[in-house]
Image (cartoon, grey):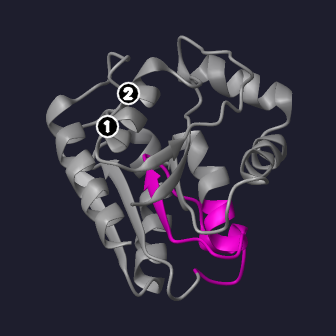
Amino acid sequence: MAEVVLFHHAQGLTTGVVAFADALRRAGHTVHTPDLFDGRTFASIEEGMGYATQLGFPGEVLKRGAAAVADLPAGLVYAGFSLGVLPAQYLAQTRPGARGALLCYSCVPVTEFGPAWPADLPVQVHGMDADPFFVDEGDIDAARDLVAQAKDGELFLYPGDQHYFADSSLPSYDPEATALLTERVLDFLRQH
């Protein structure tokens, strides 16, 4: 079974993020859900990003992500939802021993954290094909580049325009897409 660190999105560690982690736990995986926002949650992406900016985004978010795994073993799968992709991708690319990366709703250019994606590090990127954050802000292009570099990389696009589609506590929740995402993530964790 895998040991996973799941970093939350800009609205904080919502009950929907915890519910997703619980689905992985029910399959037998160990899942850590660090709270980068000190218990705060927000009603909108804009409010959450405002708070992240106050903290010192992106630097402080990356620092808090690294601190959250400092006492954990090296062989982790790093997962992130949107804002949480930053620490997940950063740690997957830079912390020795990573077993995999699961990047949901977001992806940053590989060159933000190093010259190239680690050759043998498996990765999945998940996003909706009409999500304005994922498609219009360049994340989909970064994801395509990352997957092209990875020996074992997959980009999964789901029909729709919602950003946080796998967070069951938000209006953007899409049960069908979430079921498929969960199935693909569990398959990834079984393999890696």
- From the viewer's perspective, tell me whether residue 3 is left or right of residue 20: right
User: Badge 2: few (under 14), some or many (20 or more) residues near its Cα, within 10 Å?
Assistant: some
Q: Does the magenta stretch include residue 111?
A: yes
For the C terminus, the quadrant is bottom left
Name the residue rendered at 47%, 76% in the picture: 145
**Disc 1, disc 2: CB below 8 Å?**
yes
Compute the Cα span from label 1 to label 2. Answer: 6 Å
Residue type at mark 2?
Answer: Ala
Position of 157 relative to 133 (above/below): below
Residue 65 rendering spot, x and y as whole percentages: 73, 47
User: Badge 1: few (under 14), some or many (20 or more) residues near its Cα, within 10 Å?
Assistant: some
Q: Residue 131 shows which numbered tag?
A: none
Position of 112 relative to 7 (above/below): below
Name the residue rendered at 52%, 57% in the picture: 107
Residue type at mark 1?
Answer: Ala
Residue 57 rendering spot, x and y as whole percentages: 78, 39
| Location of residue 131 by image quarter | top left
Residue under label 2:
19
Indicate the secondary structure of the residue bearing disc 2.
helix
Q: Give the range drawn in magenta.
A: 89-117
Residue 120 rendering spot, x and y as whole percentages: 50, 87
